[in-house]
Image (cartoon, helix red, strand yellow):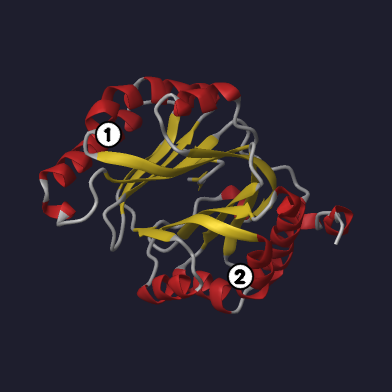
Amino acid sequence: MTTATFIKPLPPHMTDPIRIGAEISVTGKWVPKTPGGLFRKSPDSTEMLKEWEDIHAGARADSGVLSTEINHAIGADAVLVHHVFKDADALVHYFSDTGTKHMQALTAVAKPEHHLFRGIEVPARARDAVNAKGVEAAYGDFLFGFVREDYRAPDTETAVQVTAKWTAKSPEHLQELKYWWQEVGTDAFSMEKDMLRYEVYQVQGEAALIIHETFRDTGELMFHLTKGTANKYKKGIDQIAAPECYFFRGPVSWTIRTYSKFMHLPATYSSLGSNHTEPGGSMSSGLT
């Protein structure tokens, strides 16, 4: 098929401009520098968790950090971090200040894996601040999506956040990859009423997309995987792209963890750990 075949108008529910403004979100993963063994019971594990709690305290005190989470992975030696920054300047300040203070001690026992940055546009100064810390990162600029319930924050006791990166098998497949994810968002709006948020970002400099979805609860996520749009379109997406990473944050059931592995998703799962949200919340994670 030609590229033009995959260009079509957005449905009405994905034509409203997204309201995240200058905010930038990041979801990322840290793992032990030396894998294997009983890491959770080791001094390195204690030191890594201490450093992350100190970093979390610094983020809470930073007015430019609208929300922050330090979540310990389920069934894996890893930490998932999630931050929402007020703007690019706040991100640069965080990585130059809090990040610099703790980087040496943290990297002595741990190392960063995928970090997925999302925004209307992630500018060069923000990318430079992250790259200076040696963090493996992808930077996504907003393409299309929808948000329900006027950006109200979901219930953290039940909601599941999914953030993933899909990379096309060749640059020629990028337009087709966009097409398939547009189809997901088109149908999910009516098929999956409790998918509260659906956003697609194009990765800068790569034939890849970052996908972010918020589900009201684990039941809606299970429907998405087994009967909804993931079930409907994944075979088509698999033909032209592959997932690099999947981050699940929230009360993900054992059944979903098992089924997502059956779907060959390179997933990391975490429950909600140390967290803080500024009064009012954010447009990126939800208004309180």
Residue labelled with disc 1: 107
CA neighbours of label 1 inside 10 A, class few (<14), some (14 to 19), many (20+): some
Amino acid under label 1? Thr
Amino acid under label 2? Ala
First in sequence: mark 2 vs mark 1: 1
Answer with left or right where residue 253 lies relative to residue 216: left
Answer with left or right where residue 66 lies relative to residue 2: left
- What residue occupies the far bottom of the structure in this picture? 227
Q: Position of residue 196 (x, y in %)?
A: 58, 59
* Residue name at image x 50 percent, y 51 percent: 153
Q: Nearer the viewer, residue 70 or 176?
A: 176
Residue labelled with disc 2: 230
Q: Is residue 245 placed above or below 62 in the rendered structure?
A: below
Residue 196 is labelled as: none
Q: Position of residue 174 (x, y in %)?
A: 72, 51
* Residue name at image x 51 percent, y 30 percent: 86
